[in-house]
Amino acid sequence: MNQIEITPLSRPLDATVSVPGSKSITNRAMLLAAMAQGRSVIDAALMSDDTRYMTGALRALGFIVESDEAACRITVGGRGGIIPHHGAEIFVGGAGTVMRFLAAMLTLGQGRFRIDGNQRMRQRPIGPLLDAMQRLGASIYSERDNNCPPVIVDMSRGRFEGGETSIDARVSSQFVSAMLMPAPIWKSGLRLRVIGETARPFIDMTLRLMEAWGVHGSRDGDLIVVPGGQWYRAQRFAVEPDASSASYFAAAAALIGGTVRIKGLTSHSVQGDLEFLGVLQRMGARVAWHPDFVEVIGTGQFAGVDVAMNSMPDMVPTLAAIAPFASSPTIIRNVAFIRHHESDRIRVLATELRRLGASVIDKEDGLEIQPSTMHPATIETYDDHRIAMSFAIAGLKLRGVTINDPGCVAKTFPDFFERLAMLEPAA
């Protein structure tokens, strides 16, 4: 299917929705399970392109990984900090978490490893992670000497021990998470000074998941300490529903009006993207937390907002797509680094919003979006799942929105359009 036209909703919503498991948690859990000793079972896992790339990568490294897609269950045979194969060629497509997480984890191995990705992945920076690892003595480098993938990890010269260094996290917090997860197994652990971090909640998520899998670390301001000589415990682990995926349905409640209940999301979530619900509250929606779901209630009328979104960068497209329908301007700040995501999201969002008739100023670090009179258009998606899903929500309000290449949502939410079509208006 090369394109899909979104059917607008004429009445307020009264819908209960479920969303797939968190990509961020699923890929972290698989990596932690591989480093644990013994068999781990990951329930409610996300089954998508990104998690399949992680599954394929672990198999290429010699781990036994079983995937039951119907049950959303992944079983990983961990090897207690050992990588079975001595060297491997790994392809990760457009999965940034897989590229970055593996680059640091492969220091547990022996031999020469090469990690490559698709054309866009070859443009995405990884230099700060390579620099930090090199300062610790790792032989890890960009094959083309341009601080982008392909990445070579050469572990033929002896065991990597960790130590103390700093890392520039202004481009991505994933660089920090990548170093933290193998750190307990490194002989000297890790003392890491984080410079200019972007999305702190994702780093906190990593530390909380590491603790859940049996190791401990501490954080004091910009210093993170993970002692060495620790081991992850194999276990049965349940993945939370994805807060990023939930954001589209929460935004729909604010945009269309009515009530959307999102199953499985609670106020105790480790996911920083739940902060987006607070943004919707500032805009005029109501959010009610329950023991096993969250409820978002909107009127279809809402104000714009001025918000720094560096702690929830994946939520920028969601907010941008509904911002032209607000009664006042929306200003999105402090997200210059999203130019290096699956697309240059600042440029792409400005381009596609203007295609719909919106008045937009794109700045180096964000967007300013005015209340606008919108018109039908066909949206280009740039092989970026979040662009496709965000503008689909705008199509619930504006007739005539068509999404090109809707299949790109397979990266994180393969049946997004089927679930969107099941949204129920109030009787």
Image (cartoon, grey):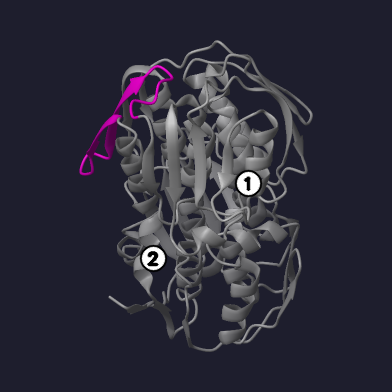
Left or right of 78, for residue 242: right
Closer to the observer: label 2 or label 1?
A: 2
Res 149 seen here: yes
How far apart marks 2 and 1 lie (CA) works out to 25 Å
Disc 2 marks a residue whose amino acid type is Cys
Instruction: Using the image, determine if residue 232 lies above or below residue 271.
Output: above
Task: Tell me where residue 253 appears, x and y as whole percent.
Answer: 51, 61
Q: Secondary structure at mark 1?
A: helix
Q: Is residue 249 rendered magenta in the image?
A: no
Task: Tell me where residue 73 appears, x and y as whole percent.
Answer: 27, 35
**Quarter of the picture holding the C terminus:** bottom left
Task: Tell me where residue 118 appears, x and y as whole percent.
Answer: 43, 60
Of 213 and 57, nearer the camera is 57
Instruction: Using the image, determine if residue 325 lies above or below residue 412.
Output: below
- Please name the residue that numbered disc 1 is placed on: 275
| Span highlighted in magenta in the image | 63-85
Task: Tell me where residue 290 appears, x and y as whole percent.
Answer: 49, 37
- Please name the residue that numbered disc 2 is placed on: 408
